[in-house]
Every structure is written in C-alpha cells, then in structure tokens.
Amino acid sequence: MNRRYLIGVVLAAGTALWFGLGQGSLPEGPGRELVLQKCQTCHELGFVTRERQPRERWDAIITEMQSYGLRLTSEERATILNYLATHFAPGAQAPTPAPQPQANVSGAQVYNNCIGCHQANGSGVPGVFPPLAGHVPSILATRGGREWLIQVMLYGLQGPINVRGSSYNGAMPAYPQLSDAEIAAVLNHISTQWGNGFPSGQGPFTEAEVRAQRGKNLSPQQVLSARQGLGLR
Ligand code: HEC
Ligand code: HEC
C-alpha cells in the first residue's frame, strides 16, 4: 500500500495547486516559456496573471522589474512584452482551467485493503473482525452514522464493541492516506454489497463529505466514544 506522510500529501497538494494556478493560467503562445522561467523567481506568477494592462504599461512594468534585478536580453524582453501585451491586455479573459481528470475510483479495488480482516464476503471473523455484511446499514441508519463511518476510515477505531451479538476488542487501522474519492468509494462499496443498501433517503457518499471530516485529528479511542453516542445496539 502506498503510505505517505500527511505532510507529504499536504505539500504535494499545495504544489499541485500552485502549479495549477500558476502555469495553468498562462495561455499558450510564443513567450510563455520565458515568462515561466523569468517571472516567478521573485514572486508568484499570480502577480503577472491578475494584471490586464496595455502594451505601454507592460513595457513600464518590465522596466521596473529590471530595476529590481530581472536580467533579460533585448530579444527576450521583446518576446515577453509581446506575450504579455497579447494575452494580458485590458479585457482579456482568464484562460479556462485545464479540465481535471474525472475521479474514477473503484470501491471494490479499495476494498482489497480490507479483505484480510473483514473478508471478501464482508462476514468478518466472529470475535476478531466485525462483519460489514448485514451491519453497515444499521450504522448508516443512526443519527450521525454517515459521518462516523468516515471518521472510522480516517482515524481508526479501538476498544470494546458489540456487533450482532458478538463482542470485539481489536483495532481498526486508520486510512488517512486514501484520497477523499477513495474513501467515498470504499464506503459506497460496503454500503451496497452483500445485500447491504442505503437507508431510504440516503445517497452515495461524496468526496465533499469525506473532506469535511479531515483535519479533526481524532484518536481511535475518541472514535470509539463517538460510536457509543450513535446508540447502536
Ligand atoms: C528580480 C526580482 C523580480 C523578477 C525577476 C520579476 N519581478 Fe515582478 N516584482 C518584483 C518586485 C520586488 C515587485 C514589487 C512587489 C510589491 O510591490 O510588493 C514586483 C511586482 C510585480 C507586479 C505588480 C505590479 C507592480 O508594478 O508592482 C507585476 C505585474 C510584476 N511584478 C510583473 C513581473 C513580470 C511580468 C516579470 C517577468 C518579466 C517579473 N515581474 C519578474 C520583482 C521581480
Ligand atoms: C487489520 C484488520 C483490519 C483491516 C485491514 C480493516 N479493518 Fe475495519 N475493523 C477492524 C477491527 C478489529 C474493527 C473493530 C475495532 C474494535 O474492536 O474497536 C473494525 C471496524 C470496522 C468498522 C466499524 C464497525 C463497527 O460496528 O464499529 C468499519 C465500518 C470497518 N472496520 C470498515 C473497514 C474498511 C472499509 C476497511 C478497509 C478500508 C477496513 N475496515 C480494514 C479490523 C480491520
């Protein structure tokens, strides 16, 4: 399994966002590479892309940047000026962001992480790993059950519980390294397999619901106390 440290994920996401906002907002055209290379060494590209200026003003801005220490040959200067005057003229539209790849995650595939304990048929192992088959719908039906299931995925669960007449006292590992889409997908999987189904009025888990439960830093014991609050029998 691909385990990453949270900090790595945050940095990677931040970098992706930064590149997404920066590079994605520069339209194609001669001079684009030069702007990428020369205009984000001292500040973000956003300083450039938010401006809409006539050619004379861009000319003056480049001169100002040269006074700050920007080094350009006269040829590079002319290319950059043409690029900015063309694509960042008054009234120019912000370029449409590149379409994001559609999240296409299979819950069955993510469930491969769970099979070792909860079993392919969701029956679990009596007294050791609780069943998900015939059980997840009763969690969904409680008040707060949906949010709580997401918390089990993100933060784990540890301590004594009772499921369908058997007691368990194990530890469910946390899966913070799974993406929001992956967690939503696996929860949708266990909510609809083996005869399970969503209670009437409930739809599939969404990435936004998962995102809303991140950053709470719950301990597995806190997730256990939250379980007691659900009133599961
Ligand atoms: C050597 C450092 C440096 C480089 C390289 C640089 N800038 Fe700047 N830029 C600055 C500084 C310093 C400011 C002023 C920041 C502030 O006022 O807070 C600035 C501000 C700006 C602003 C805001 C408006 C203004 O006049 O203050 C624009 C637009 C801008 N830069 C465009 C560019 C473009 C286009 C390039 C590439 C051709 C570029 N910069 C490269 C240092 C640089
Ligand atoms: C290493 C074994 C293990 C793995 C892997 C595992 N679980 Fe668990 N899971 C458990 C144990 C043990 C519990 C009960 C914890 C306790 O006793 O407090 C549990 C509890 C749960 C519960 C809560 C049941 C309840 O009534 O409280 C859900 C939901 C769940 N697991 C889903 C999953 C899903 C989905 C995956 C895969 C992403 C998964 N588990 C992976 C061992 C595991």
Image (tube, grey):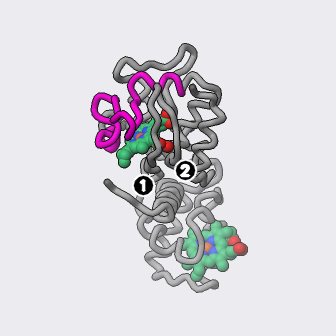
Magenta segment main secondary structure: loop
The magenta stretch spans residue 198: no
Point out the quarter of the image occupied by ligand 2: top left
Q: Amino acid at mark 2?
A: Pro
- Determine whether the residue tagged by mark 1 lies in a helix, strand or loop: loop
Q: Residues within 10 Å of mark 2 (few under 14, many from 20)?
A: many
Screen quadrant of the C terminus: top right
Magenta-colored span: 110-139
Residue located 41% across and 30% down the image: 132
User: Does 132 appear in magenta?
Assistant: yes
Q: Answer above or below: position of 188 versus 155.
A: above
Residue 12 position in % (x across, y down): 46, 61
Residue 120 seen in render:
yes
Instruction: Name the residue that disc number 2 marks.
Output: 220
Residue 34: image quadrant is bottom left
Q: Position of residue 216 (x, y in %)?
A: 63, 51
Q: Which mark is residue 28?
A: 1
- Decide: is 173 above or below 209: below
In primary-sequence order, the first of circles 1 and 2 is 1
Q: Can residue 83 be seen at all in this image of the molecule?
A: no
